[in-house]
Image (cartoon, rainbow, N blue to C red):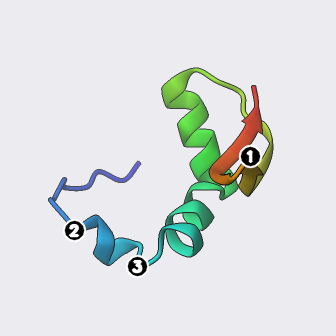
Amino acid sequence: MNIGKLEKVDIRELWKHEQYGFSEWLSKKENIENLNDILGLTLIDISKETYVGAYRCDLFAKD
């Protein structure tokens, strides 16, 4: 187990572009598994930047 120190960061420095940075990072298997654990979900069939009408949804999945 790794124990780290929480530190305040500028989120825009971590992910320069929301679509190509954050959405790409969040959609990785290990991050979806962490999200499932935290939210008590079982997200499957994940797609990124899916059009919903005139807008795009960062992540679209089934529970």
Lateral position of residue 8 relative to residue 38, left or right: left
Q: Secondary structure at mark 1?
A: loop
- Identified at 36% across, 53% down, the residue is 2
C-beta proximity under 8 Å, tags 1 and 3 = no
Within 10 Å of disc 1 (Cα), the crowding (few <14, some 14-19, many 20+) is few
Lateral position of residue 6 relative to residue 20, left or right: left
Residue hosting label 1: 53
Front residue of 45 and 33: 45
Residue 27 vertical position relative to residue 36 in the rendered view, above or below:
below
Q: Secondary structure at mark 2?
A: loop
Lateral position of residue 25 relative to residue 57, left or right: left
Residue hosting label 3: 16
Q: Quadrant of residue 44?
A: top right
Residue hosting label 2: 10
- Identified at 63% across, 41% down, the residue is 33
- Give the mark count: 3
- Identified at 52% across, 72% down, the residue is 21
